Amino acid sequence: MDKSSLRIKHLNLRKSLSAEDHQGFSALIFKQLIKDIELYDHIGIYISMAHEVDTRSIMEWCFRNHKKVYVPKILKSGMIFVHIQDLSECKMNHIGILEPISNEASEGIELMIVPLLAFNARRHRLGYGKAYYDRYLRAHDCMKVGICYDANFEPELIESDTDIKLDKIITEKGMI
């Protein structure tokens, strides 16, 4: 199956989860992820959309516990991460994604929490197809942790030389 077909398959798998499963699985993932977050002060994290592992509760925990939070913003030149202290510093962009208002790029991320649609046992990820994270992670040294639902495990995932392997993937059932 090609990457485009795999994206459709795994988006549909996510959409088939009930709201209760989505919330419960997200809470289980957060419970495991907190062990990594506690080790770092500068956390890069995406702002979750529908059907993704919920990151808003993770961000709120980080704000309460004095972690510096950096969220992505897409510019013509690529993806940057912007330091925010509250989600009120973000707004919907033209395609409906919540992103920071500021265009001031920040450096120093120690732990990057990476979105993914699917993954394999070798910690390769299937992203949304724009390669923003692969390009960003290639240029920045940090701990790379993917969070995803266990149902999105894909043994037939196509790997390429340009893909960045994650250090760890956390699902509601455990870690890879």
Image (cartoon, helix red, strand yellow):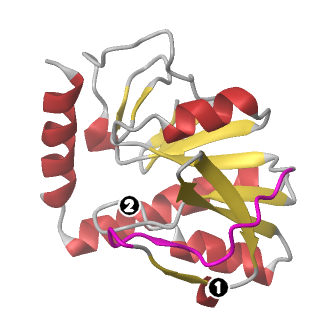
Tell me the amino acid under the disc marked 2.
Answer: Phe
Task: Locate residue 120 relative to residue 70 in the image: left or right.
Answer: left
Q: Would residue 151 be counted in the magenta stretch?
A: no
Magenta span dominant secondary structure: loop
Q: Quadrant of residue 6?
A: top left
Residue at position x 30%, y 68% from top? 50
25, 132: nearer the viewer? 132
SS of the residue under disc 2: helix
Mark closer to the chain start, 1 or 2: 2
The location of residue 20, given as percent across then percent down, is 25, 74
Q: Is residue 47 visible?
A: yes
The location of residue 103, given as percent across then percent down, is 69, 67
The location of residue 36, given as percent across then percent down, is 73, 50
* Residue neighbourhood size for the residue with mark 1, other residues' Cα within 10 Å, grouped as few (<14), some (14–19), many (≥20): few
Q: Which residue is mark 2?
A: 25
Q: Quadrant of residue 66?
A: bottom right
Q: Which residue is mark 1?
A: 89
Tell me the amino acid under the disc marked 1.
Answer: Glu
- The answer to whether residue 154 is above or below residue 104 is above
Residue at position x 50%, y 9% from top? 161
Q: Determine the CA span between mark 1 and mark 2.
A: 27 Å
Q: Would residue 98 be counted in the magenta stretch?
A: yes
SS of the residue under disc 1: helix
Residue at position x 76%, y 66% from top? 104
Residue situated furthest bottom in the rendering: 88
User: Which stretch did the figure color magenta?
Assistant: 94-107
